Amino acid sequence: MKTQPITTVGKDELPVLDNGIIDELKQLVDEDDPDFLNEIINGYLENAAENIKVIAEHVHTPDAEIVMRMAHTLKGSSRNVGAVAMAHYSSELESLSRLGNYPEKTGDLLRQLEVELERVKNEMQSLLTPV
């Protein structure tokens, strides 16, 4: 199934969220658990913020392994919730960390992840439903 982005941002015109994945998540909500989507969104946002915090703590150290693992985790969870740009930048950071192309470019990617997190928060906040 081909999906359409909700919005596009940044110089690469990467979508903030993938409409198709969001629609799939909405379909998982049923009347027995109307708060399910809220739980997914809030859980993702909390975990993404924590992952970025750990990346920030280690991005300027020689410990590329931690950065690589956190970026990998963030990439996967971002893909699962349709946070396209976040997944893209996480993937780039994971690759750079794996290759050892470290502090210079990774600092830029960290800043981009922080910006993307705010964009994702703004988009996802509009998806939250009062329960």
Image (tube, rainbow, N blue to C red):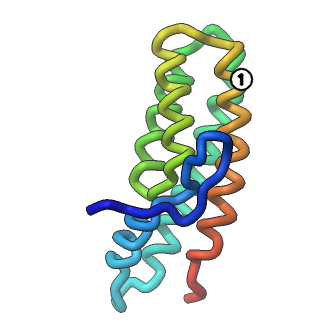
**Residue closer to the observer: 50 or 74:** 74
Is 121 rendered above or below residue 61? below
State which quarter of the image contains the N terminus. Answer: bottom left
Q: Quadrant of residue 15?
A: bottom right
- As drawn, is 46 to the left or to the right of 21? right
- Nearer to us in this view, 100 or 40: 100
- Name the quadrant of the C terminus: bottom right
Residue at x 53%, y 8% (from the top left corner) = 100
Name the residue carrying label 1: 107
Residue depicted at x 71% and y 23%: 107
Residue 117: percent from left, percent from top: 66, 50
Q: Position of residue 11 (x, y in %)?
A: 67, 41
Spot occupied by residue 67 in the image (x, y as percentages of width and height) = 56, 24
Query: Of 59 and 6, which appears nearest the observer?
Result: 6
Amino acid type, label 1: Gly
- Left or right, 107 with respect to 26, comes to right
In the displayed structure, 51 sits above or below 6; it is above
Residue 10 position, x and y percent, is 67, 45
Identity of the residue drawn at 58% across and 13% down: 63
SS category of the residue bearing label 1? helix
Relative to residue 10, is residue 20 drawn left or right? left
14 lies left or right of 104: left
Crowd rating for badge 1 (residues with CA inside 10 Å; few <14, some 14–19, many 20+): some
